Image (cartoon, grey):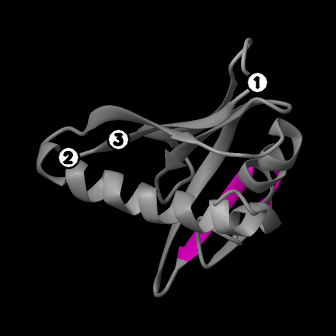
Amino acid sequence: MDSKIRYEIEFPINSSPQLLYQYISTPSGLSEWFADNVNSRGEFFTFIWNDSQEKARLASKKSGEKVKFKWVDESSKDTEYFFELHILVDELTKDVSLMVVDFAEKEEIGEAKQLWENQISDLKHLIGSV
């Protein structure tokens, strides 16, 4: 099995970092744009799309700045893969952007980036950043 490759994409978003953080760090916020439904039990989040679900552990968070979810296997053990959502604020212009760090197999990176673009587009519509 091919190992996955890390990639990053940055999306400008017209939003306050505080509002954006609510949408990337809470089950209710994430279920509005990232997955069909998101449940959490302690540090574990279950992301549900159509007929599939994936489980991740909230590996780290810094209030108002970033969250990192590590994907876990069936026995809730961390895998080597994660995704991170990092809010960046330009010191001079105060422009806000969202940096996405994720992994995909080499031949699927284009498709994975397209999926993120669609999801971030949904997020922008939610917070009125279009």
Amino acid type, mark 3: Phe
Q: Which quadrant would residue 92 be assigned to in this image?
A: top right
Residue drawn at (43%, 57%), measured in percent from left and top?
117
Question: Where is residue 88 drawn, in percent x and y?
Answer: 66, 26
Q: Secondary structure at mark 3?
A: strand
Q: What amino acid does circle 1 point to?
A: Lys
Give coordinates of residue 126: x percent, y percent: 73, 68
* Mark 1 residue crowding within 10 angstroms, few (<14) / some (14–19) / many (20+): few
Compared to residue 105, the image places residue 122 above or below, namely below
SS of the residue under disc 1: loop
Q: Disc 2 marks which residue?
A: 105
112 lies left or right of 87? left
Q: Which residues are magenta?
A: 40-48
Q: Position of residue 77 (x, y in %)?
A: 53, 44
Choose between 117 and 47: the one closer to the eye.
117
How far apart in space, not on screen, are marks 2 and 3 (Cα)? 7 Å
How crowded pointer 2 is (Cα within 10 Å; few <14, some 14-19, many 20+) is rated as some
Q: Position of residue 46 (x, y in %)?
A: 64, 65
User: Which residue has dot 3 on it?
Assistant: 103
Check the image and report above or below for 33 versus 111.
below
To which quarter of the image does residue 29 belong? bottom right
Q: Per the image, is 44 magenta?
A: yes
SS for callout 2: loop
Q: Is residue 46 visible?
A: no
Which residue does the image show at 76% across and 61% down from the upper left?
A: 127
Residues at marks 1 and 3, CA–CA distance in whole angstroms: 29 Å
Q: Residue at x 34, y 33 (%)?
A: 7
Q: Which mark is residue 94?
A: 1
Q: Nearer the viewer, residue 126 or 51?
A: 126
Q: Amino acid at mark 2?
A: Glu
Is residue 73 found left or right of 67 in the rendered image?
left
